[in-house]
Amino acid sequence: MSELYIDGNGLTVDDVYNVSKGNITVRLAEEACVKIDRARELVDSYVSENRVEYGITTGFGRFADVTISMNEATELQYNLIRSHSCGVGDPLPIEVVRAVMLLRANTLAKGYSGIRLQTLNTLVEMLNRDVIPVMPSKGSLGASGDLAPLAHMALVIIGEGEAYFRGKRMPGGEAMRLAGIKPVKLVSKEGLALINGTPVMTAIGALAIHDAMNLSKAADIAGALSMEALRGIKDAFDERVHMLRPHAGQLKTARNIRILTEGSSLITRQGEIRVQDSYTIRCIPQVHGASKDAIDYVKGIVETELNSVTDNPLIFSEDYIVISGGNFHGQPIALAMDFLGIAISELADISERRIAKLVDSNLSNGLPGFLTREGGLNSGFMIPQYVAASLVSENKVLSHPASVDSIPSSANQEDHVSMGTIAARKTREILENAINVIAIELMSSAQAIDLRDGGSPGKGTGAAYRLIRSRIPFIERDELMYRHIEDCAMLIKTGELIETVEGEIGSLN
């Protein structure tokens, strides 16, 4: 198994994805260990000198003005973890929690948090030995970071709470024992260092970005197949058109459609059958492209956050000073996740309209109604379009931004919060819905191509068509459709659709 050395710098969305899947071992870089030790020395000196510093010798939140004695500093850390472990809701998926653990470790590895090296090494070893805390999905306001869910992670580090070990749920202490990891005895500042920050919202966001990038390619493939099935006009994808409005995503999408449909005998030229297509075909580059640009923008925000210090207070060992700030506030991720959700929703929105054209004999340029030869006796693709419409409508509700809301907490000490984790969680739901919509379009367009008299798809669309047909048959008579939708969605989720098509035509953008 390959290794990833972390030092707080250079972590990418792909790194997060690989660690989340258990495909890579995590190690602390040597230079990070030096910085971690130096910061810890400064914390120890503050404690021994009885200096008053937030989170080290004081309480938290509204209790920031309550001074804690040196003898109580350790008890304070345990009280913090236990009192903050009040998350609710279904547990986050294991892959998300693995990503959270990586992000927290990467932040601490920068050496500004004052944690001991042995404590951070325990977190890393938990990740490598498959001790994954049970982390409830709800309870974060996204300011002071993800306090509640992260406290459940910290519980397992001290041998409490619950965890999965090799996929089995059990008490945290038992999981640590089975993995051969000794629980940590926390000292001053460490509890706060473990739970103060944005890794939950950012981890969910990083995985969503990875999947959204694949989804945007799958949407182009589905759109190209639908264009062929509807005898679409290729002139609208001419590079000369898009160079006059050179948004990066628009140019990439137009190129994708051109290379996907290269060699197709199904697509037409302007004026051959009709003068122009409706927007859901003609404007694929403009709509898909705008979503691509949004995804790229959000990727930049997320990768900045992956390599940021987001806890408080911050330990500047070189300057021998501790500064209390607000890097834990999730606003950058909150806004980005809301934007990402909207961008993904639009991919599904235009996809559903193409499905609607395919099943409507008044709009499909000669295809039978609902893509079945014996309509009436068979419903064909009538209800898959219903499902797509339902998912798109749900996404419209979920796309309402969470970041525009705020509610004060901690007796108005924390009087503006980001709701970043809510934004990230609902974006994950939007993504799941969108994947299913695109899957339905892929199935529908393959069915429509089979119903055409003659003609063959292009080089790229042909590869996609053959892959779909290797899993999903032509639907001659009504049968169980949900299994086919699931199978087609898996082609997107696993990346097999993209890999197959790119293996034929080269990389898509």
Image: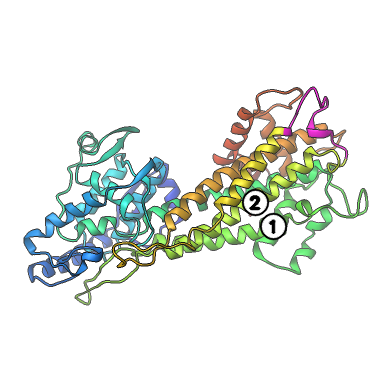
- Residue 499 found in image quarter: top right
Q: Position of residue 73 (x, y in %)?
A: 12, 60
**Which comes before the other along the chain, label 1 or label 2?**
1
Q: Which residues are magenta?
A: 366-382
- Disc 2 marks a residue whose amino acid type is Leu
Mark 1 and mark 2 in contact? Answer it, CB < 8 Å.
yes
Residue 134 to residue 296: above or below: above
> Type of residue at label 1?
Val
Left or right of 498, for residue 118: left
Query: x, y percentage for residue 335?
Result: 49, 63
Left or right relative to 53: residue 453: right
Q: In this rendering, would 478 be left or right of 437?
A: right
Q: Is residue 375 magenta?
A: yes
Residue at image mark 2: 347
Q: Within 10 Å of the Cα at label 2, are there few (<14), some (14-19), or many (20+) other Cα atoms?
A: many
Q: Residues within 10 Å of mark 1 (few under 14, many from 20)?
A: many
Is residue 212 in view? yes
Q: Quadrant of residue 412?
A: bottom left
User: For the point 15% across and 57% down, which residue is it?
Assistant: 76
Q: Which structural element holds mark 1?
A: helix
Q: Residue at x 28, y 66 (%)?
A: 312
Which of these two is toward me, 491 or 312?
312
In the orientation shown, which residue stands out farthest toward the right?
272
